[in-house]
Image (cartoon, rainbow, N blue to C red):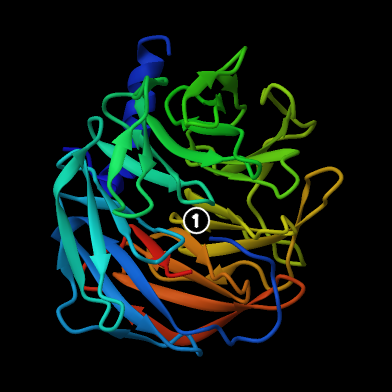
Amino acid sequence: MFKRGSWLAAIGLLLAGLAACGGGSNDSGGGGNTNPPATMYVSLPTSDQVAVYRVDSSNHATNIIGSPFTAGTAPTSVLVHPSNKFVYVVNQGSSNISLFTPDSRTAVLSEILPRTPAGVGPVSMIMNNAGSLIFVLNQASHDISVYSVNASSGVLSEVAGSPFTTTIHPAALALSRAENFLYVANVNLNSVSAFSVASGGALQAAAGSPFPVDGTGPFGLAGGASDHFLYVVNQISSNVSIMTIDSTTGALSEIVGSPFAISSSGTTTSVGTGPSSVRLNSSGSFLYITCAGTNNLFGYSVDSNTGKLNPLTGSPYTTGTGPSFTVITASGNTLFVGGEASKSISHFTIATDGTLTSVTDMLSTPTGPSSLALTH
């Protein structure tokens, strides 16, 4: 069984072995810190559970009665359908997908069985904006499962041709904003695979794919609002590659000077190590990178013409131990950070200039969180 946290620790060994052989919803930033009340779902892989919290307008989270709820083995990723009627959890250890229906009044989860089979060792999943397709990245079987979503029942049906083969040890996937291309980070091959996405969800590898990345250990991806650039964080070399996207073919090429160090500005420069996730807001104007090696979060403004990054004032920001993911609320004024090692979720308010202010109301989770999703 593959565990995502263990995988992070093992990347260096896997890369060394190859060398010996020759080889969540974003939105625009905004002032204020008020959000509509929501429900938060958090996957807990080491306890095989999903925790559920009520989140008030000040982002204070309260555990609901009965939480956490049992999922499959080692749930690593959670999604909420745009209708808020269905919650999906991908289970890495049992290689399947759980479908839950939340009670509209209490938020209590009820699982709809049987679970949907996935490939071997699924590590992450994403959904298109319409909620009609789900893409699941299977790390151990080196492929991508694609499912259509029944809007009435939430039941998943695998599309024709699925699963679609990708390269060995894929680590992360991302849809372009136009949802016509899908990208996969290949952690051991220092490359990114590109696929075109048909209207029914079928994938076709782009000509020339996979595309090389100059950094080592690409582990996270984020696409800009204009679909001109793709940002790739490299876990081993601790830097970020910026790649241009061919709008017709989806092909990638690294910009001049890439990869760039993950660092702050000012008289005393801080450098981040072990980047574990990357997140853009929906306007593509701000980008945030978690660094598990230094337990902090780096923030940048994005040059819309060149794609280059400029450190935000006050960056880096302190997080919990082992930050592994970020989520921005739909209103765009709050950012949540999951601390896998500290078993916590911290949050920050986002100013109009993208700078962050830490809120002391940190949420403790029963075990280390691996992902988070909020109702829409």
Quadrant in the picture for residue 100: bottom left
Label 1 element class = strand
Residue 71 appears in the picture as rendered: no
Quick one: which residue is furthest to the front in this view? 152
> Up-down: is 157 above or below 55?
above
Q: Position of residue 248 (x, y in %)?
A: 74, 24
Q: What quarter of the picture does the N terminus occupy?
A: top left
Q: Position of residue 236 (x, y in %)?
A: 47, 38
Q: Nearer the viewer, residue 339 or 90?
A: 90
> Up-down: is 51 above or below 5?
below
Quadrant in the picture for residue 118: top left
Q: Residues within 10 Å of mark 1 (few under 14, many from 20)?
A: many
Residue 134 appears in the picture as rendered: yes
Residue that appears at 42% across and 88% down: 60
For mark 1, what is the residue? 291
Going by the image, does 54 lie left or right of 255?
left
Q: Position of residue 251 (x, y in %)?
A: 67, 22
